[in-house]
Image (spheres, rainbow, N blue to C red):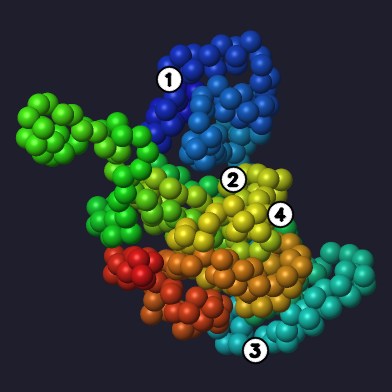
């Protein structure tokens, strides 16, 4: 069991050594983790992972390899077949035809939705399933899980099914982008290189061969000339949308992230979800405890940074236009207020959208942000990157 785990980590390019693996086995033999899978998870992570950038890959391998074990004692026993509770819950989920969905009406706006939710919370005393009014499951109510409503609040559901919720009541965790992912085509890097602007800065510690030859010929003796090394002087600030509908584009965004880190020395990045608000973050595992004020970001980075948003811009319009519109927290100011503050500060800004450009006009939120960006929204294609670099170089 443990040997297979070790090899799967190697296959996932987690740099785990044989010495670290033997240390883990020794700790298991001495009973450090007992028979708890959770304790073994933390023990193995502490023993085998040396760089936090590999935590996501470790979690994926661990979850796949030890899936279904309640304790380490289960690993050597045959577990009696039984129907998982999750399967039973799924049986009650409501699946509707397109015609049935069209007949279901929304409550008619953000204010009405929030007011009704508050009233339901005060009145409801028990669990409900399959209805159209109360907070429950598998129905057509605007509030609850595993049902359908054209505009509602998702409560108690692990992930989106229809992507129609305008607010998500539950705590959600998102993964950092992996900067070690190799991009699939060299042309993406070539497109990004058009943003580079070379300058010689710093100490004169590089031999200037041409200057040395000229000076020696002019002086009549060897006159060694030195010069500063050339560096890419362009400064880039990237804000990545993470989680939710962006899960469909993780791979291509990781390729972009990897390419950008290769091409630009002066690169800063932060994460947001759907729309920037008052806080951004560097690590999705600590996104609630270690947020950075968006105002601090504006005040920290000078206006000559090139600001690039990366996101599908697909969300409820309330998330952009209304205070409290965020799906995850109560934002005192609307998302468009924070967007405008960022755009007012940074002279050069653009938005990269991984969703195909031909679909943009079907989504109201994309239209809103496209207008706010004054048309500077570009698809995540080679042609789109070429247009973006041309705009940012103006």
**Which residue in the protein does label 3 denote?**
103
Label 2 packing within 10 angstroms: few (<14), some (14-19), many (20+): some
Residue 260, given in percent of the width and then of the height, sits at 38, 51
Near-viewer residue (238 or 68): 238
Task: Give me the disc on residue 194.
Answer: none
Label 2 secondary element? loop
**Which residue in the protein does label 4 denote?**
171
Near-viewer residue (87 or 276): 276
Task: Say if residue 129 shows up in the picture.
Answer: no
Q: Residue at x 32, y 55 (%)?
A: 196
Label 1 secondary element? loop
Residue 199, given in percent of the width and then of the height, sits at 32, 49
Q: Nearer the viewer, mark 3 or mark 2?
A: 2
Alpha carbon separation for disc pair 4 and 1: 35 Å
Judge left or right: residue 187 versus residue 3.
left
Answer above or below: position of 305 versus 22: below
Label 3 secondary element? helix
Alpha carbon separation for disc pair 3 and 2: 42 Å
Residue 10, given in percent of the width and then of the height, sits at 39, 29
Q: Give the number of callouts.
A: 4
Lower sequence index among marks 3 and 2: 3
Alpha carbon separation for disc pair 1 and 2: 26 Å
């Amino acid at each position: 069991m443990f040997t297979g785990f070790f090899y799967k980590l190697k296959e996932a390019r987690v740099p785990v050594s044989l010495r670290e693996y033997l240390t883990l086995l020794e700790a298991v033999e001495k009973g450090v983790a007992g028979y708890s899978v959770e304790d073994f998870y933390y023990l193995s992570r502490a023993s085998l992972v040396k760089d936090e950038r590999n935590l996501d890959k470790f979690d994926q391998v661990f979850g796949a390899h030890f899936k279904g074990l309640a304790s380490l004692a289960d690993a050597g026993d045959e577990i009696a077949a039984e129907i998982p509770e999750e399967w039973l819950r799924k049986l009650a989920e409501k699946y509707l035809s397109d015609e049935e969905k069209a007949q279901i009406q929304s409550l008619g706006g953000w204010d009405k939705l929030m007011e009704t939710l508050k009233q339901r919370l005060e009145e409801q005393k028990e669990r409900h399933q399959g209805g159209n009014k109360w907070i429950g499951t598998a129905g057509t109510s605007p509030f609850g899980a595993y049902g359908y409503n054209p505009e509602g609040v998702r409560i108690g559901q692990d992930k989106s099914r229809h992507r129609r919720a305008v607010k998500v009541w539950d705590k959600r965790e998102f993964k950092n982008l992996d900067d070690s992912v190799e991009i699939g085509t060299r042309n993406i890097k070539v497109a990004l290189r058009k943003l580079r602007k070379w300058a010689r800065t710093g100490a004169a510690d590089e031999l200037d061969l041409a200057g040395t030859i000229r000076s020696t010929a002019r002086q009549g003796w060897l006159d060694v000339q030195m010069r500063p090394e050339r560096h890419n002087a362009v400064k880039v600030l990237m804000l990545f949308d993470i989680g939710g509908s962006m899960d469909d584009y993780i791979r291509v965004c990781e390729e972009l992230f990897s390419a950008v880190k290769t091409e630009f020395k002066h690169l800063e990045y932060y994460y947001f979800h759907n729309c920037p608000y008052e806080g951004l973050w560097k690590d999705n595992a600590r996104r609630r405890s270690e947020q950075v004020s968006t105002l601090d970001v504006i005040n920290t980075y000078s206006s000559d940074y090139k600001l690039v948003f990366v996101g599908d811009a697909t969300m409820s319009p309330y998330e952009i236009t209304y205070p409290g519109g965020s799906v995850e927290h109560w934002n005192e100011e609307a998302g468009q207020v924070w967007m405008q503050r960022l755009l007012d500060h940074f002279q050069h800004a653009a938005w990269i959208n991984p969703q195909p450009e031909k679909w943009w006009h079907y989504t109201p939120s994309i239209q809103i942000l496209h207008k706010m960006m004054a048309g500077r929204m570009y698809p995540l294609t080679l042609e789109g990157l070429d247009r973006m670099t041309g705009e940012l170089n103006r």
